[in-house]
Image: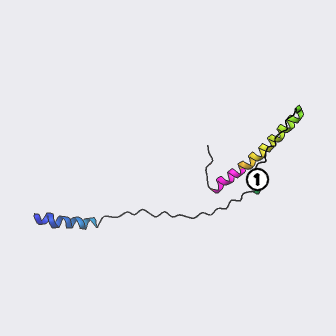
């Protein structure tokens, strides 16, 4: 009985453990992705500096013209920034925020 526990049992465990299958994790295949995104030159322009108004009394018509010019300038800048933002998102496959 002593022979069984000292030699046969460990030997049979060794033999049976050799039958166990070893599962290896597959190596991930990384496919390099090269993507070129052209950035329109117009989108790289800085927004113009808003001019300082001189301190004086303005007529209603002058204020309307100044306000309309500032709104137009802001809309142009906002559309350029939005286009640049979309281009960067596309280049880096980023999701749009909700």
Q: Nearer the viewer, residue 45 or 29?
A: 45
Where residue 78 sits, quadrant-wise, is top right
What secondary structure do most residues of the magenta stretch adopt? helix
- Front residue of 52/67: it is 52
Q: Which element carries disc 1, helix, strand or loop?
A: loop
Residue 80: where, in percent of width, then height? 75, 49
Q: Quadrant of the C terminus?
A: top right
Q: How many marks?
A: 1
Asked if the magenta segment contains residue 85, the reply would be yes
Pointer 1 local density, CA inside 10 Å: few below 14, some 14–19, many at least 20: few
> Furthest residue to the left?
1
How far across and down, in percent of the image, does residue 36 sit? 67, 62
Relative to 90, is 21 above or below?
A: below
In the image, taking residue 12 as reference, residue 45 lies left or right, namely right
* Residue placed under numbered mark 1 in the picture: 45
Looking at the image, is 57 positioned above or below residue 75?
Answer: above
Specify the quadrant of the image occupied by residue 35: bottom right
What is the span of residues highlighted in magenta in the rendered image?
Answer: 83-91
Task: Estimate the x, y position of residue 41 in percent, counting from the top left.
Answer: 76, 57
Residue 63: image x %, image y %? 86, 35
Q: Using residue 73 as the reference point, say whether residue 24 is left or right of it.
A: left
Q: Residue at x 30, y 64 (%)?
A: 20
What residue is at 77 percent from the left and 43 percent from the top?
Answer: 74
Q: Name the residue at 27% across, 65% down.
A: 17
């Amino acid at each position: 009985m002593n022979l069984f526990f000292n030699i046969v049992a460990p030997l049979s465990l060794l033999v049976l453990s050799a039958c166990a299958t070893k599962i290896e994790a597959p190596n991930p295949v990384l496919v390099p992705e090269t993507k070129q995104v052209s950035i329109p030159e117009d989108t790289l322009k800085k927004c113009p500096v808003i001019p300082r108004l001189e301190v004086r009394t303005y007529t209603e018509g002058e204020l309307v013209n100044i306000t309309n010019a500032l709104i137009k300038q802001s809309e142009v800048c906002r559309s350029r920034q939005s286009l640049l933002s979309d281009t960067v998102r596309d280049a880096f496959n980023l999701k749009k925020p909700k």
